[in-house]
Amino acid sequence: MTALERRYRMLLIAYPRTYRAAHGDELIDVLLASARPTQSVPAVREALGLVLGGVRSRIAHLATGSAWVDGVHLGVTAVSAANLAALLPYAGVLPWWTLLSALAMFAVLRGRPRTAFALTALTGAKAVAVAGGWALFDLTLIPVAPTFMTGDFLFQRGGPFTVALGYAIVLLGLLALVWRGGPARVRSWWWWPVVPAIAWAGPAWMPDGAPYALSLSRMAVEVAVLGLAVMAAWLARDPRWALASGIYLLVALGELGSHADALTRQYVAYWGVLVLLTLAAAIVPYRPRRHCLD
Amino acid sequence: MPRGTSEVSEPMYFVLAALRGGPLHGHAISKSIQELSGGRVRPSVGTLYGILERLNERGVIAVDREETVNGRNRRYFRITDTGQALVEAEARRMYEVASLVLRPTTT
C-alpha cells in the first residue's frame, strides 16, 4: 500500500463503516487513478470532497427508518448524557450511582429502552431525592462535594424540579420507545466525550457571585451539537433532528425557568441561541427544492 | 445554468449526459464529465460518488454490472429510462431558454 493510498484510506473514515466495506476500495481505485504518478499527499480538493461526502453519507444513513422514533431516541440520548454529566464530578462520593447513570446511558446508546428505563428510573429517583434533601435507598450526606471538574456542590444550582424534569423527559421518551416495540438504533460512541465536556465547569467567564454560572464548555458542546443537527436536517430534509433538539431544549428551558429571578442578558442570549438553532433545524427540512433531484 | 424547480444540478446533468453513451465506471464518468464540460466541471471523487448514490437511489441511474479489477470492486453505472427522459427534458428546457437570447432578433 502506498503512502497516498494509506492517507486516502484515513480520509475514508468519514464514511459509514458499511459504505466503506462495500465501496471503499472502489473510491480508492478512482482516487489513485486520478492522482499524479509521484503524488504522495491527497489533493486538498479530493480530501475535502471525501470528508463532505462521508458526512453526507453518514447523515443519509442516519435519516432512515421512522423519524419520530429516531428523533425521540436521539433526544433521549442527549438528555441522558446531560444527566450523567451532572453526576460525573461527584463520582468519588457517589461512585455506584454515577456508574448506574453511565450504564443507563450505555443502554440508551445500545438501543435497549427497557433496560435504560429501569436504570434511569433508579438513578433519577436517587438524584431527585438528593436534590430535594430526602433520604432514599442509601444514606447520602448533603451537600455532596465535587471530586473534580467543578467547584459546586451537587445540584447546588438546581432544585428537585429541574433534576426531575431531565429524568422525566428521558423516562417518557423511553416509554414511547418501549411502547413502539423492538430495539432502537445503536448510537455512536462519540456521545461519550460529550459527557465530560458538559460536566466541566470551566473556563470561568461569568462574574464572580453569579447565582447560576453557565459553563463555557457546556455551551460550546450544546451549540456544536445543535449546529450539527441543523446541518443534518438541511442535508437530509428530515425532521428527526428538530425533534431531538426540541426534547433537549425542554430541559434547557426548565433550567431557565428555575432561575427566572436571576437571569441576565447573558443567560437570555444563551437560550436564544439554543432556541434559534432548534427552530432552524425545524425549518430547514422544508426549504424549497432547487431542482427535482435535490 | 438558471435555477428552477424542475431542473437538475449542473454536475448531475453532466453525469447523466456522460452515461448516455453507455455504462461507465466512476473514473470513466469523471473523465467524461471533464471532456463534455471542457474541463469546467470537475467534481471531486467524494462529490461524484455522492451524486451517483443519490441518482441511483432515485432510479435515474442503475448499477449495470460489477467487475473486480486489481482486487478492487468496480461498479458500472447506466442511465435508466427515467434518467434518459429527465436529461432530455432538461436539455430541451435549456435549449428553449438559450434560444431566447441566441436566435436572431427581428426588428
Image (tube, rainbow, N blue to C red):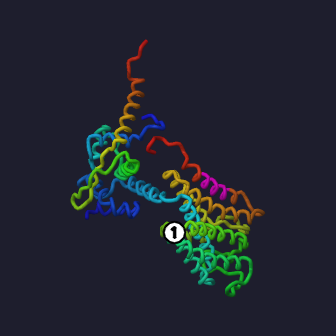
Q: Which residue is mark 1?
A: A182
Residue A266 spot, x, y in % from top left: 69, 59
- Compared across the picture, whether B75 is left or right of A76 comes to left
Residue A10 spot, x, y in % from top left: 36, 63
Residue A251 spot, x, y in % from top left: 66, 65
Q: Residue furthest right?
A: A261
- Compared across the picture, whether A23 is left or right of A265 comes to left
Residue A45 seen from this side? no
Q: Quadrant of the N terminus of chain A?
A: bottom left
Type of the residue with mark 1:
Gly
- Region of the chain picked out in magenta, as a range: A269-279
- Measuring 30% from the left and 54% from the top, which residue is drawn there? A31
Mostly what secondary structure, the magenta segment? Answer: helix
Residue A272 sits inside the magenta stretch? yes
Give the letter of the chain under mark 1. A
Note whether A153 is above or below B13 in the view shown.
below
- Quarter of the image holding residue B16? top left
